Amino acid sequence: MPDETVEVTDVNAERTHANVAHRQEQITKAMRDILDLEQRIDELKAEHIKPLQNDIKTIKQSTIKGDLGLKLKAFNWQYKGFKMEQDAKRFDDEAERDTLLDSLRECHEATVRGQMVDFVDVLQQVQAAE
């Protein structure tokens, strides 16, 4: 019997290699695209966001700390509640808004009375003294 050698081409191996190369190209392109977008975001932040953040810092340093002599920690703590209240007022769903506002009031009343200085009382005393 003659010795016959049959050459078999592995079509799947060729497809797999082509697929791997294509996937690697896609991954590299995605990484470059993401990096480009992140760099654009950083540029926009530097141009638009940083100046606004500096404006906030200036207001806090000059008005809150400087002119009023308030501690920034105390102001920032109160500001968080104020901001949440303002955000809630913009809710489209009135029931959700009212529930959140009621919760904020309840939490504020539970923690302020008897445990912390009531800023409203302090402000009223300052206004009365003037």
Image: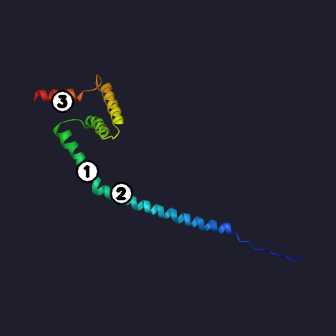
- Judged from the image, the secondary structure of the residue bearing numbered disc 3 is helix
Camera-side residue of 122 and 72: 122
Q: Position of residue 97 (x, y in %)?
A: 33, 36
Indicate which disc, 3 or 2, sits on the residue closer to the N terminus: 2
Q: Residue at x 11, y 27 (%)?
A: 129
Pointers 2 and 1 in contact (CB under 8 A)? no
> Which type of secondary structure does the marked residue at label 2 adopt?
helix
Vertical position of residue 112 compared to residue 91: above or below = above
- Quadrant location of the N terminus in the rendered image: bottom right
Q: Amino acid at mark 1?
A: Leu
Q: Position of residue 66 (x, y in %)?
A: 18, 40
Q: Is residue 125 above or below residue 1?
A: above
- Residue 4: numbered disc: none
The structure residue drawn at horizontal position 23% and vertical position 49%, both measured from the top left corner, is: 55
Q: Position of residue 117 (x, y in %)?
A: 25, 27
* Residue nearer the viewer, 106 or 114: 106
The residue to which callout 3 is attached is: 123
Identity, as a three-letter code, of the amino acid under mark 3: Leu
> Mark 1 = which residue?
52
Question: How many angstroms separate mark 3 from mark 2 (CA)?
Answer: 42 Å
Q: Residue 41: which disc?
A: 2
Q: Residue furthest top?
A: 114
* Residue 19: percent from left, percent from top: 59, 65
**Numbered disc 1: secondary structure:** helix
Tell me the quarter of the picture where residue 45 sits.
bottom left
